[in-house]
Image (cartoon, rainbow, N blue to C red):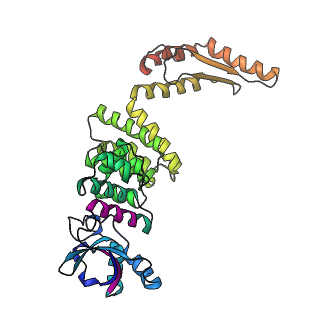
Amino acid sequence: MRFQRIALEKIDQQSVPRDPEGPFGIRRADWDEFLITYKPEIEEIAVDLKRLGQIYPVILEERGNDRYRIVAGFVQIGAARKTGWQSIEAKIFEQGEIPPQELFLLALSGRILEDSISPVEKAVALKKALTSFGFKEEEIGREIAPLLDIPPSRKVIRNYLALADADEAIRDAVHFGHLPANQAFLLLPFEAADRLALSNLFQNLRPSFNEAKEILRNMGDVARMQKKPIKEILALKEIERILQDETLPRPQAGLSKGKKREHLRQTLKKLRYPLLSETREEMYKRLKALALSPEVRVTFDPTFEKEEIAITLEAKDEEKLACALKTLQAALAAGKFASIFSLLEGRGPQEGKRDEV
C-alpha cells in the first residue's frame, strides 16, 4: 500500500459516475462492484471540492498497465473531473494485496465515513456483499449489518436485499426521503403496478407505519372482494375524491393529510363491509328520528354484535330531567324504538324501515 497523486486519466473511466439518471447513477448498466453511492450529487460535491480542496484520499486498486480501479471515492473522482482537476491524491493497493472481501469492507467503511448512507445504499451494499463478494447470509448479519446500523435479523436483511431489486421509482422515493424504508418493505410483495400506485398513495398521505399496514390490509380485502387489482381500487371515484383536493366538495376541500387518511380509512371500511356501513348509517338516521332532547344519549355497538342499546341521561336540574324523560316516553309511546330494535335484531335496513314511525 502506498500514497500517491494519480492522474485522473489513469483511473478506470467506467468506474466514474457519469449519468445521474442511469442505473445507480453511473454510465454503464453493470455498475462497478465497489460502487455503493446511489445517484450521487456530483455538482454539489464539485462545489465543495473547489472551495475546500481534497480532504481525504480516494482508495484505488492497481490493475496493471498503469491503470487503477476505484475502491472508494467514486463521487470525489467524479467531482474532481467536473472541476477540471488533472490528478487526485490516492491510497493505492497493489492488485491482490488484500482479498476482495476486505477491499469491499474498506469501500463500505469509506462510504459510511463520507456522508450519511441512505436505506437504498444500505440495500445496494448488502446485495453486493452477497452476490459479488461471496459473503454468506450469516456473515452479512455478523460483519456488515452492524456497520450499516441494520438489525442482524434474516427478515430485515432480506427486506433490504429485495429493496435493492425494487423498481427505480420505489428506490428513488426511499433514497430521497419521500417514502420510509419500512413502508417500502410492505409494498415489495405486491405486483409492480399496484406497488407503484400504493407508493404514490403513501407519499401523498404520509401515513404512520401502523396506518400503512391497515391501509394495505383493507385495500387488499377490497381488491379481493371486487376481483380487481389495487391500482383499479385506488382509481375508484370515492377514493380519488379524497386524494385530489380539487375534486372534493367544498366542505372537504383542503383536507389535511391526517383527515385524508381518516376519510380513506372510513371509505375502505365501507367498501370492505358494505352492508355493515349501510346498516350503521341507517341506525344513525333512526336515532335522529327519535327527536330526543340533548340530555338523552343513545349508543349502540357499531359492529352490531350486541343487540342492545345504552341510554344515558345528563341533567342539571329537575326541569331538564323531566324534559328528557318526556321525550323518551313520547318516542316510546309512538313506537319509534321498534325500528331501532328491529335493526339490532339483524334485520337489514330495508326490512327495518317498515317499523319506522
- Relative to residue 72, is residue 131 depicted above or below? above
Q: Is residue 100 magenta-colored?
A: yes
Q: Is residue 52 above or below residue 327?
A: below
Q: Position of residue 342 (x, y in %)?
A: 49, 14
Residue 35 or 57: which is nearer the viewer? Answer: 57
> Is residue 37 at all visible to an observer of this figure?
no
317 within the magenta span: no
Q: Classify residue 61 by image quadrant.
A: bottom left
Along the line of sight, the residue nearer the viewer: 75 or 299: 75
The C terminus, quarter of image: top right
In the picture, measured across the screen, residue 17 lies left or right of residue 177, that is left
Residue found 33% across the figure and 58% down from its top: 125
Q: Nearer the viewer, residue 171 or 353?
A: 171
Identify the image quadrant of the N terminus. bottom left
- What segment carries the magenta color? 87-110
Where residue 165 sits in the image (x, y, percent)? 27, 53
